[in-house]
Image: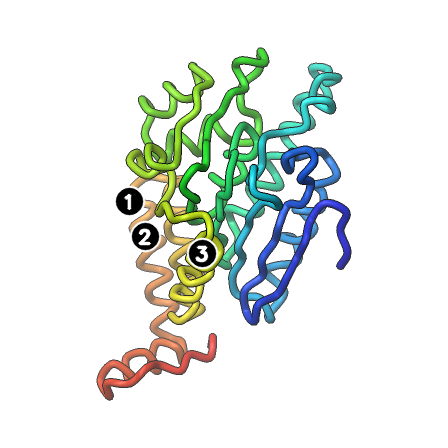
């Protein structure tokens, strides 16, 4: 598949998706959002890909935000539609049964940070800058930022970032739990790929169900989440992967999972 604003490179079972609008600091326009939707829409049915790294082209930005020129002309009706479409694309990423790692290589502002928040894990390069500056433009985050940031770092920290429109560096983002790791810029993609391959060495069905348990469990009560966890645990007990994993542990050898 060929895109105007994305680069997609397969590295074995890993797909590296690069948002490539360097002259616009990779800003998310409608076309780019549509292309992201296409990539992740096909992901779950593509058996050749087991995990994704999402990053930005160039050295300055992961994604510097939404395309302000497009947003400036929004009406109340079109603005709500634009927000809903963006939320749907990011929700598709968030609910993927295959792990998605954001490799944040520079500015991750506004829609860019919202995109990173929709990924399962985040690694930032030293020098990366993050924030939700929408209030400085007279609007609020519209691609899920008000919801995901609070769930990730807590209400107080999220409100401070959202209400001030301020920015934080990679070190502070790591301190508050916004990113999982901070690495030198030259190590960003290698570290992201190493983390993803560490995950992919585990049982593929177990990885998928773990993602489902956490994502869906957080949407309900604790009791509902525990019930879901038990159900998924029981389903895994019927798989060949479970038997292989247990047998390999007993025999003190690496498991050979088949995803069945």
At x 43%, y 44%, the residue is 125
Q: Residues within 10 Å of mark 2 (few under 14, many from 20)?
A: some
Closest to the observer, 219 or 151: 151
Secondary element under disc 3, as helix, strand or loop, is helix
In which quadrant will I find the N terminus? bottom right
Q: Earlier in the sequence, mark 3 or mark 2?
A: 3
> 258 left or right of 35?
left
Where is residue 149? Give x, y as percent.
41, 31
Determine which residue is flagged by label 1. Answer: 223
Image location of residue 31, percent across then percent down: 75, 39
For the residues carrying marks 3 and 1, which lies nearer the camera in this image? Answer: 3
Q: Secondary structure at mark 2?
A: helix
At x 40% / y 48%, what residue is drawn? 184
Secondary element type, mark 1 = helix
The numbered disc on residue 192 is 3
Which residue is the site of mark 2?
A: 227
Distance of label 1 from label 2 (alpha carbons): 6 Å
Asked whether 27 or 80 is in front, the reply is: 27
Are dots 3 and 2 in contact, CB under 8 Å?
no
Mark 3 Cα-neighbour bin, 10 Å: few <14, some 14–19, many ≥20: many
Query: What is the spatial separation of the Cα atoms under label 3 and label 1, in whole angstroms?
Result: 34 Å
Pair 3/2: label in front: 3
Q: Position of residue 129 (x, y in %)?
A: 46, 32
Q: Are marks 3 and 1 in contact (CB under 8 Å)?
A: no
* Callout 1–callout 2 Cβ contact below 8 Å: yes
Is 69 rendered above or below residue 16? above
Name the residue nearer the viewer: 58 or 143.
Answer: 58
Mark seen at residue 175? none
- In percent of width and height, residue 105 lies at 50, 43
Q: Residue at x 25, y 81 (%)?
A: 249
In primary-sequence order, the first of circles 3 and 1 is 3
């Amino acid at each position: 598949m060929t895109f105007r604003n994305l680069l997609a490179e397969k590295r074995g079972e890993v797909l590296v998706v690069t948002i490539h609008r360097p002259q616009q600091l990779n800003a998310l326009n409608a076309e780019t959002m549509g292309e992201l939707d296409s990539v992740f829409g096909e992901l779950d049915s593509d058996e050749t890909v087991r995990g994704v790294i999402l990053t930005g082209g160039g050295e300055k930005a992961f994604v510097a935000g939404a395309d302000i020129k497009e947003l400036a002309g929004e009406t109340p009706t079109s603005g709500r539609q634009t927000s809903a479409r963006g939320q749907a694309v990011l929700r598709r990423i968030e609910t993927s049964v295959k792990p998605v790692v954001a490799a944040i290589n520079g500015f991750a502002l506004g829609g860019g940070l919202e995109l990173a928040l929709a990924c399962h894990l985040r690694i930032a390069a030293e020098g990366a800058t993050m924030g939700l500056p929408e209030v400085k433009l007279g609007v609020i985050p519209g691609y899920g930022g008000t919801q995901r940031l609070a769930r990730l770092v807590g209400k107080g920290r999220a409100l401070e970032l959202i209400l001030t429109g301020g920015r934080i560096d990679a070190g502070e983002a790591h301190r508050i739990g916004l990113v999982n790791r901070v690495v030198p810029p030259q190590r960003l993609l290698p570290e992201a790929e190493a983390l993803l391959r560490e995950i992919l060495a585990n049982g593929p069905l177990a990885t998928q169900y773990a993602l489902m348990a956490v994502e869906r469990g957080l949407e309900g009560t604790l009791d509902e989440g525990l019930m879901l966890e038990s159900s998924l645990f029981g389903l895994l007990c019927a798989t060949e992967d479970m038997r292989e994993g247990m047998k390999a542990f007993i025999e003190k050898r690496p498991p050979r999972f088949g995803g069945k």
